[in-house]
Image (spheres, helix red, strand yellow):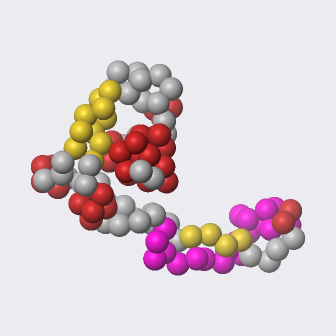
Amino acid sequence: MARYDEKEILLNASKYYEPLRKLRDVKFISHYETPMLNHPDVADRAFLATERYIWKYGDRFYNLAYDYYGDQNLWWIIAWYNGYPTEAEIENGSVLEIPLNLEQITRALGV
């Protein structure tokens, strides 16, 4: 259930990556196609079970993902759902909503 499941691997030979290709002595840089995620609207959110979490000093998305989902690699679900690209954007005392049902939230996100 990773963001990149079923995404195509692209071989990139663009000029932008030329310094990196030279450094690595390769002809192409391979990377995943960018996933397109939805932002759940009010109607989607109304049907999702969530738990409120108050952000505190030292918190990390990957630790929350492990605590709630048993998989630290699902940190991006909590980040995307709450609209925070990184932990640095969150102030202590901020209230986050943690989606509890992985099947429902991944469907709402379009994964």
How many discs mark residues in the rendered view? Answer: 0
Q: Residue visible at 42% across and 30% down?
A: 90
x, y percentage for residue 77?
Answer: 38, 51
Residue 20 lies left or right of residue 5; in this view the side is: right
- Place residue 54 in its image quadrant: top left
Q: Residue at x 35, y 45 (%)?
A: 68
Q: Is residue 31 left or right of residue 1?
A: right
Q: Quadrant of residue 16?
A: bottom right
37 is higher (above) or lower (below) than 6:
above
Please say if 57 is above or below 8.
above
Q: Is residue 19 visible?
A: yes
Viewer-proximal residue among 60 and 80: 60
Q: Residue at x 42, y 46 (%)?
A: 65
Answer whether residue 75 is visible to the viewer in this image.
no
Give the x, y percent position of residue 30.
67, 73
Report if residue 16 lies within the magenta region: yes
Q: Is residue 28 left or right of residue 7?
A: right
The answer to whether 7 is drawn above or below residue 3 in the figure is below
Could you tell me residue 105's position as x and y percent?
27, 57
Q: Nearer the viewer, residue 36 or 74?
A: 74
Q: Residue at x 25, y 34 (%)?
A: 52
The quarter of the picture where residue 21 lies is bottom right
The image position of residue 70, as x and y in percent, is: 41, 51
Locate the N terminus by quadrant: bottom left
The question of residue 24 being in magenta is answered with: no
Say whether residue 79 is left or right of residue 47: right
Q: Which residues are magenta?
A: 4-22
In what quadrant of the picture does the C terminus appear? bottom left
